[in-house]
Image (cartoon, helix red, strand yellow):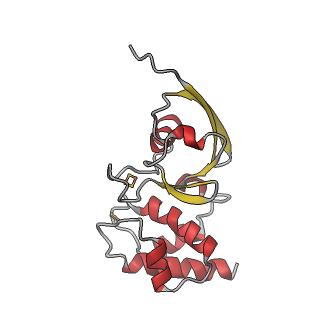
């Protein structure tokens, strides 16, 4: 029998608040996938290495496998499912598609969320700044060249919109 007391949390996820009673040991990524049923946030490792679980917590990119869900209580989370606006792809999503910046796509949500923060901090990054901004994300398929091209492409689109 699990005698662990439950924790009450409320997290705004993609604009909608989800309240729940959870095991205080639940990871944020587990909460997002299992309670919010938003499975675009992936789990690719158990070492805080791959970045597949990256989402925005109060506007900052974090690896959600490194946080407890209770640490996000009262915060705003944006996942990859929250990037679309009015059924239009986010400019980064469109640029990833245009530049063939994914193959299997497993890493893509994490790259997109890190890139959102990168372009928010620096709307006109050069290659070195993009590599640094995405250093916490790993891709085993693409070789990164097209990912960098996609982020540059999105930056141009976003600056001109
Ligand atoms: S699942 Fe790999 S860093 Fe979070
Ligand atoms: S596209 Fe397959 S791991 Fe990145």
Q: Is residue 139 visible?
A: yes
Q: Residue furthest right?
A: 161
Q: In the rendered view, does 105 fall on the left or right side of 37?
A: left
Q: Is residue 32 above or below residue 130?
A: above
Question: Looking at the figure, which quarter contains the N terminus?
Answer: top left
Q: Residue furthest left?
A: 140
Residue 145 image point, x, y percent: 37, 80
Q: Nearer the viewer, residue 97 or 40?
A: 40
Q: Residue at x 31, y 76 (%)?
A: 143
Q: In the rendered view, does 113 fall on the left or right side of 121?
A: left
Q: Residue at x 29, y 66 (%)?
A: 140
- Report which quarter residue 131 is drawn in: bottom left
Q: Nearer the viewer, residue 120 or 146?
A: 120
Residue 2 image point, x, y percent: 41, 17
Q: Is residue 44 above or below residue 11?
A: below
Q: Residue at x 35, y 59 (%)?
A: 49
Q: Nearer the viewer, residue 88 or 109?
A: 109
Residue 105 image point, x, y percent: 38, 61
Q: In the rendered view, does 139 fall on the left or right side of 72?
A: left
Q: Nearer the viewer, residue 143 or 73?
A: 73
């Amino acid at each position: 029998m699990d005698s662990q007391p439950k924790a009450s949390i409320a997290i705004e996820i993609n604009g909608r608040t989800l309240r729940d009673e959870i095991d205080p040991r639940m990871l944020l990524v587990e909460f997002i996938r299992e309670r919010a049923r938003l499975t675009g946030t992936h789990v690719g490792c158990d070492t805080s290495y791959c970045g597949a679980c990256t989402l925005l917590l109060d506007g900052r990119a974090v690896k959600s496998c490194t946080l407890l869900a209770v640490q996000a209580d009262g915060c705003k989370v944006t996942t990859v499912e929250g990037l679309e606006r009015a059924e239009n792809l986010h400019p980064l999503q469109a640029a990833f598609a245009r530049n063939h910046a994914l193959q299997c796509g497993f890493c893509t949500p994490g790259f997109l969320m890190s890139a959102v923060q990168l372009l928010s901090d620096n709307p006109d990054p050069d290659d070195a700044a993009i590599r640094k901004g995405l250093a916490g994300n790993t891709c085993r398929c693409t070789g990164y060249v097209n990912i960098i091209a996609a982020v540059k492409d999105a930056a141009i689109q976003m600056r001109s919109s």
